[in-house]
Image: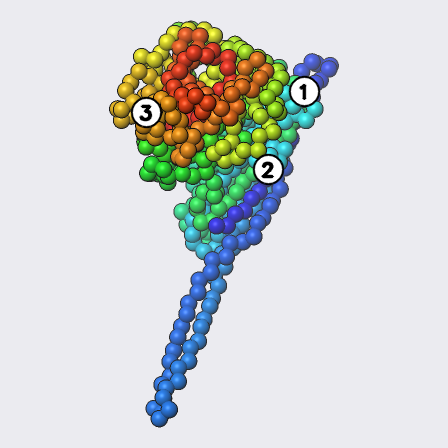
Amino acid sequence: MGHRTTKTNHKVKVHKTVSCRIDFFYYAFRNVLLVSIPLLVISTFILGFSVSHSSAIGSTFGSDNLAITISSSCTLSSVVNVPHNAEVYNGNYLGDIGKTTITTLCNDGNGYSVYAVGYSNNEEGNNKLINPERPEYSIDTGLNTSGLTSAWAMKLNNIPDDPSPTPPTIESDYNNAYGLVPSYWTKVASRASGTTDMAQGSSFTTTYAVYASSSQYAGTYQGQVKYLLTHPAYPPAFRYMQDVANWQNEIPNPGDTLLATDARDNKEYWVTRLADGHIWMTQNLDFDIKANTTLNSNTTDLNVAYDSSTGQYAEYSDGYTESNNIIYWQPASSATTIDFTGTTATGWQNSDTAPYSASKIDSTETGHASLGNYYNWTAAIASNNSSSLMQDTLSDISKNPKNSICPKGWRLPTISNQSEIAAGSSNEFRRLNYLYNGDSATDNTGLVTSPLWFIQSGYISDNTLGSYNASGFYWSSTISYDKAYILYFSGRNNRVEPNYNNYGKYFGWSIRCLARTED
């Protein structure tokens, strides 16, 4: 596979004009070309011949070999046609900022694809415009053209009068329309065949748009987008959790396992198709929740529907907004992930009115044995306040929260009163216990070994890590009044409870997500 990358750097400067008390943006983009080693496709032919002689002493044979190399030259280059500079007054939207022509060329006739990802601060996946002096006022990517939230977006256009043979196909999200700056490698253009005319290649243009809300803080904002050419047209050699629907067929059988990457923070997880037909994470979720860091439904399991009668998203979804069919969740200002060592998690609050998580940073366990993070239930369902959820949904899991802190395309397990013997049972923890542990209530061997690898990671409460290496506690989305149902198992007393509900929502438990592809 051949890879070519190019970056576009973006700088936004917001000035506060004292004389007229109007803030405006100065928006600048600069393109820098990075070229990697060209792809070499090597084809070898071996030709042999023999010569025979009529001789009393026998025959003599000889051979000759021929090897040839066919090189493929693929390039991705950029030229700034119109500088990406503009002024945007607060409360205004401005599109078609500047223009850069990106030209792709491959000489061997094979197809290729172009991918893009946010690259602000030289951090792959960072799709914000960042104010270095006031990072809390950074601008998320979005399609807003009005309202209280600033946003920026990108657009690709084929060149109408491009003389090159057959320009690339632009993906629909970016084809003459503004789309989100991706937080993980996303295909934006492709060609089914190469451009054999080495003098021309094929070209498309990139432009950007910005909306400056009336309350945006004045200052300089910087951001980048990086583009990648893959040849042939295979995707980059990684799998994102968020794209599970695209690679689920790579693990069709129970026990099939692969590594996938969470696009939100680039952490890797082992995932396995289990005997219940679902694809499960076989590591604990390790995603940090932070205040003032907005999550959206492109990367996080945010699915709640808007209730037009109340003008709200749900009773548990304080902090949610919606724009252009994308749902956003802003964690409460008190939201935090507490890093701790030993058994003291200073700063943890036993609360169901704010999201909390905690990470034991002195743990050396990796892979399936990784502890991951601990989450209270409010954080587990991606909420800022779960205290109003005071019903029992064991008999009707349709009333469970629809959101979770899992990656997009994944969700929390459900616990129900359905029999674990039934195929496709929504009593999902008990179903796994039945399939892998003989439905044992007195032995957890089948839970803590391959292929499930549940961890006795303990819990967080009152600033303290308890039952570490002794018991395991895993959240479900099923409600039990002021509690929620969990999988609980203990190595100390050989106890397994796949639908336990004797602890409050404020405890910090572990999370295992499963893919929505089989829902």
- According to the picture, the residue beneath numbered tag 3 turns out to be 439
Q: Is residue 41 left or right of residue 212?
A: left
Of labels 1 and 3, the one closer to you = 3
Q: Tell me the CA gap for discs 3 and 2.
A: 56 Å
Residue drawn at x 35%, y 11% is 393
- According to the picture, the residue beneath numbered tag 2 turns out to be 8
Residue 323 seen from this side? no
Q: Earlier in the sequence, mark 1 or mark 3?
A: 1
**Quarter-wise, where is residue 475 in the image?**
top left
Which of the labelled discs sits on residue 218, or is there none?
1
Q: In this view, does 142 lie to the left or right of 26?
A: left
Residue drawn at x 32%, y 38% is 253
Please identify the residue farthest to the bottom as the structure is shown.
Answer: 56
User: Which kind of residue does numbered mark 1 sit on?
Assistant: Ala
**Residue 487, horizontal then vertical, whole percent:** 41, 20
| Secondary structure found at label 3 | loop
